[in-house]
Amino acid sequence: MEDNTKLIETLVERAAEYGKTSYELAKLKALDKTSEVVSSVVPGIIVFVFVASFVLFLSFGLAFWLGDILGSVAYGFFAVAALYGVKAIVIYFFMPKLKKRICNCIIKQVLK
């Protein structure tokens, strides 16, 4: 009987160790995936900031240049705004495809 008790105690101890090890492994896997996703997102954000700055200054330059051509700076800004409006409408119609691609990209990164 004493032999059975020791066997059960050993089994319980091993099960507890297995549970702790599995928990630690799950934490490490989650940390790994999180670090992969963040490390791929941060450079994208940095590039986005530089591209946004470039587009902003390019837009101002285009607006002033078109303003000189059209005879009024306001007309130049209206023309650039119209270009962005058309661009926004086109993007709106392609948004479901774009959203699907972004979701697939994130899922691929997480399941990698």
Image (tube, helix red, strand yellow):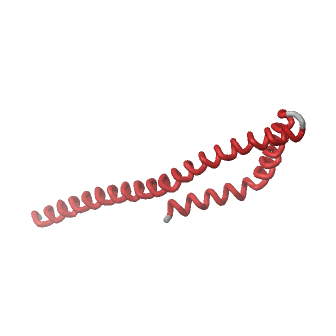
Front in this rendered view, residue 8 or 108: 108
- Which residue appears at 21% of the width and 59% of the height? 13
Name the outermost residue toward the front: 68
* Residue 53: percent from left, percent from top: 64, 43
What is the total number of numbered labels drawn onto the structure image?
0
Q: Quadrant of residue 10?
A: bottom left
* Residue 6: percent from left, percent from top: 13, 63
Relative horizontal placement of residue 79, taking residue 106 as reference (left or right): right
User: Does 78 appear above or below 37?
Assistant: above
Q: Quadrant of residue 79?
A: top right
Q: Quadrant of residue 74?
A: top right
- Which residue appears at 25% of the width and 59% of the height? 17
Front in this rendered view, residue 56 or 89: 56
Name the outermost residue toward the right: 71
* Residue 99: percent from left, percent from top: 67, 55
User: Does 96 appear above or below 80?
Assistant: below
Relative horizontal placement of residue 15, taking residue 93 as reference (left or right): left
* Residue 100: percent from left, percent from top: 67, 58
Front in this rendered view, residue 111 or 14: 111
- Which residue appears at 33% of the width and 60% of the height? 22
- Which residue appears at 74% of the width and 43% of the height? 59
Relative horizontal placement of residue 99, taking residue 82 as reference (left or right): left
The quarter in which the N terminus is drawn is bottom left
